[in-house]
Image: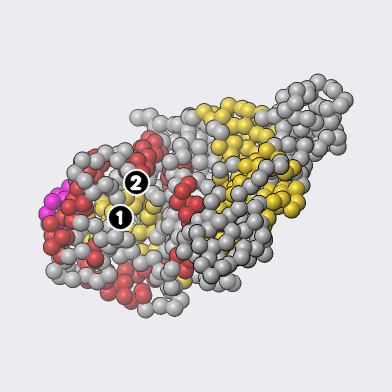
Amino acid sequence: MRTLLRFTAVPLILLAAPAPALAVARSHAPTPLHVTHAGRTSVTVAWSQPRVGRQAHPVRSVVVSVNGRRVAVVRGAHHRVTLRRLHCGRSYRVAAVARDALGHRSRVATRLVRTAPCRRGAPVSRLTRLHVTHAARSSVTVAWSPPHGHGHGRGRGLDLGQGHGRGHAHGRGHGQGRVHRVRSVVVSVNGRRVAVVRGAHHRVTLRRLHCGHRYRVSAVARDAHGHHSRRSSLTVRTRHCVHQGPAGPPVPSEPTAPPVPPGSGPRIFAYYYLWWSADHWHQALGSSYPLTASPLPLPARLDADGCHPSASYPGATVTDVPARIYSQDDPGFIEADVREAAAAGLAGFAVNWIGTGTAAQSSSSNPYSRRLQAMVDAVHRVNAEGIPFKLWLSLKASASVLPPQAIANDLGYFARTYGTDPAFDRAPTGRPTVIWNGSRKYATATLRDISAAYRPSLRILGDETTWSADRAPYLDGDAYYWSSQDPYANPQSFDQLRALAAAVRGSGRNPDGSEKAWIAPLAPGYDKQLAGGGSCTPRRGGETLRRLFAGNGTTRPEAWALISWNEITEGTYIDPMTRYGRQDLDVVRSLVQGG
């Protein structure tokens, strides 16, 4: 099976130039790169089967790059790759490096290729002006008029004229400047591509923007032959952020669905993870995932029950993707998540965070701290609009057991920086809530020391699977992180949680006189099999959420810890994505409304 790469391309004409062979240490090399086929939008590059001698290791894979960017990894006995979506009439530097099973790499073999000239002639329609049809606080809808026949129109349209880039006039009535039928429109925001609109669609809604901000939106039309129009640009602005005045009622946000009335149901805090950067997505999807495809394909297949995933791309550890690859450092992204969660009725996020572990740290010391500050700023903005949404802190201390001094330093920084910040929930003790994830992995003496130093200013909840009398004095309650709870295969789990909740409540009061808190877990499903996990809890169209809510509700929790908003690798996320859409977020909304 040939490995196909999606790039931006067109027909290639090979330029005569010698190319070095691929030579892996202690193995014979494939012959130099050569082109077996060149079309207007693709080119196939091939190499011969390597010979393996007595001192050689067989080639295991060949990494192919275009203009310095890795675009494909060809494995096994395959000796060619087709590069697609190139641009007509341009030169590209194709490079290949062979690798064997021991990690040896060959020298880089390169070949300069050039796509064929752009085709001229066929008359097609063009698009007219770019304009805004709707602007909200966190989204803008941009549209363009549909194609209106052949030839040239009036106004600043997206013209696909013959010989683009060679001085030909656009929109001036020149008969020789015929155009080609538009196949897709590429939309970018502030220079970053965010959408490809295909077919008869003539608008796109840009979401997760920041209120009161300006954005530069541009659009480039393309036809089936690889022609690109000149860029059309437009400056758009989202609606101003609305702040609640002292005498007026709260101003509602603009969610995708009507907001849940505040205080109308159980308090649910969703775990929110801060590790989603573009690089993290690339690692989770695997090196051969087509990041430039539109729409992005699902990275894995599931069985009929939503379990037993099979990766569609080598190295993928997730089964779902968003509409576009994002980074939590993108302006307005975290605030958009806050608004969407608040609209669904969530009481807040339990933000999973870890500092540097040093005594001297700040909000810019690491990516987690920068994104935590962005989260706090976003909550300030939505609270100013009268939207009730608060934060808990989830201390990231479970995946790796941290030195006690590192935990003390991180909690010290948090208490100094956010101890009095109104973005953090203080019910019912007047102190910010911290869930110590993985507390069960730490010695009782460590709990005692941290408790003595920080419980006067922080409400510290444990993550304990069992509740013992010797550890209870050092924790304000328990928030057991049970992400894989299976109501179908393990119905006894409800009895187990009832017993744990009773043990927590029966262990006496906290030093401030408050009762021990019991926070019940809640998850939509679980599937970490692509990342090495063994079990799977199917979602079954939201039924798993409903069953866990009903069963765990018999423990009479003070609040709920929803696992999770965006733990995508473990398959517990409710953030709307490609595979499940808004299914589970809507179920959570109905649970909050139904109480």
| Residue range of the region highlighted in magenta in the rendering | 451-457
| Horizontal side, residue 255 vs residue 494: left or right | right
At x 46% / y 71%, what residue is drawn?
536
Foreground residue among 266 and 36: 36
At x 47% / y 60%, what residue is drawn?
103
| Residue that label 2 marks | 368
Q: Quadrant of the C terminus?
A: bottom left
How far apart marks 2 and 1 lie (CA) works out to 10 Å
* Rendering coords of residue 362 (x, y %): 26, 39
Q: Residue furthest top?
A: 172
* Rendering coords of residue 62 (x, y %): 58, 57
At x 72% / y 24%, what residue is drawn?
156
Asked if 437 appears above or below 169 in the picture, the reply is below
Q: Which mark is residue 396?
A: 1
Q: Residue furthest front?
A: 54
Foreground residue among 516 and 247: 516
* Rendering coords of residue 305 (x, y %): 55, 72
Q: Which comes sooner in the sequence, label 2 or label 1?
A: 2
